[in-house]
Amino acid sequence: MRLSAPCPPRRALALLVLAALALLAPPPASADELSLVPAFPATQLKGPAAAKGAVIWNHGINFIYGTEGSEAPLPLFLPLFRDAGWDVFRLLRPRMSEEPRGSSAELAATAARLKQQGYAKIVLAGQSGGAWLSLMAASRNDDIHAVIADAPAWYGTDHPNYLKNGYFLFDYLDAIRRGRIMISYFTDDPFDPGGRGQKSAALLEAHGVPHLVLDRPEGFSGHFSGNTGLFLRRFGACLLAVAGDGEMPTPASCDSGWGEAPSKALPVPRHLVLAAPAGGPADPFLGKWYGYYPNGREVMLAVERADAAKVEAAYILGPGLEPGQKASVAERSGQVADGTLVFAAPGKSSLRCTPREDGRLDALWIAADERSTLAAVLHRLP
């Protein structure tokens, strides 16, 4: 009788490692582990008969050593759907059971349950890993009316592993046959291997799927650009259009152009008098400077008086997105120090303006308690 050859030590070790990894890997998420909760608990749900539809928000990926992704703030555009008559939910995915196939399957099943309850339209929206799962779910469920996917990614930033954020994503997009798909990719996103915009549009076009791909729109930078007030200001109406039934918007028609020039909501004083050049250190800062903060507020700085020791300026803010964030005009006193215009006073927020090589100003707002900051790039108005 012929005996089988003993397993080589290295191969045996490899098998043991694989077996151990299989035991340690979290099982796919189940319906008992994922929770569907109202995104805005203070707002009563309208129910399937009265609501325009249901929106399911999907948070980013859960990191094994991090906090629960469900604790991340909601994107600023999500209240837009609540106020337009949609019931808005969040799908909470526990960190220890995070696995894309299981999570996307449960998301698809959740969408199907809401559809069975009578919601006319089901919209999946998500950022990063949540956007990834939304697109995966759309490839396996024909009940999904639309997907809003911001900066989809699952495989981290390490090279070359992050290339999977491209070619694996293309597989899921290639499997979608129905629905309305909106995907946003942003400049300086460390999870983005590049080249995904054109390829994504081509795959959806090939299958006749209505789509809108925002490929690195100007003015946006970073992985979380879709969560900002600027994204809401620029593309808010477009988001609702994607979730509707009309013609799919295009990148050109979608962009409102907000922030390119002062809006009527910015309370610029009617009789504003600007300082004249005097050959002093404040001369590079003279004039009216305009821009916006990522939270969706316009900002203008108008230098009214300046000499070698002091600069007086009007600091003008447009209305914010949150209740109570009203437009305002404040007079600020500052001075130029080491080429930077600094407005600071005890108990007040401070503002630092630094010239850029392109002729614009980098503006940094710092809260009075120094716990939060906002950055803006200001350009000089004619």
Image (tube, helix red, strand yellow):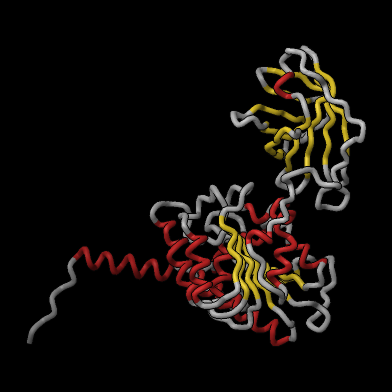
Q: Quadrant of the C terminus?
A: top right
In the visual, does 170 lie left or right of 220?
left
Q: Residue at x 71, y 77 (%)?
A: 245
- Residue 59 appears in the picture as rendered: no
- How far across and down, in percent of the image, does residue 360 sit? 66, 32
Q: Residue at x 83, y 76 (%)?
A: 46
Q: Image quadrant of residue 332? A: top right
Which residue is the extreme one toward the left? 1
Q: Would you place residue 377 above or below residue 90 in this image?
A: above
Between 315 and 33, which is closer to the camera in this rendering? 315
Q: Quadrant of the N terminus?
A: bottom left
- How far across and down, in percent of the image, does residue 86 sit? 78, 72
In the visual, does 7 lie left or right of 64?
left
Q: Would you place residue 153 above or below residue 110 in this image?
A: above
Between 187 and 22, which is closer to the camera in this rendering? 187
- Residue 113 appears in the picture as rendered: yes
Between 259 and 332, which is closer to the camera in this rendering? 259
Q: How many marks?
A: 0
- How far across and down, in percent of the image, does residue 244 sit? 72, 74
- How far across and down, in percent of the image, does residue 363 sit? 70, 33
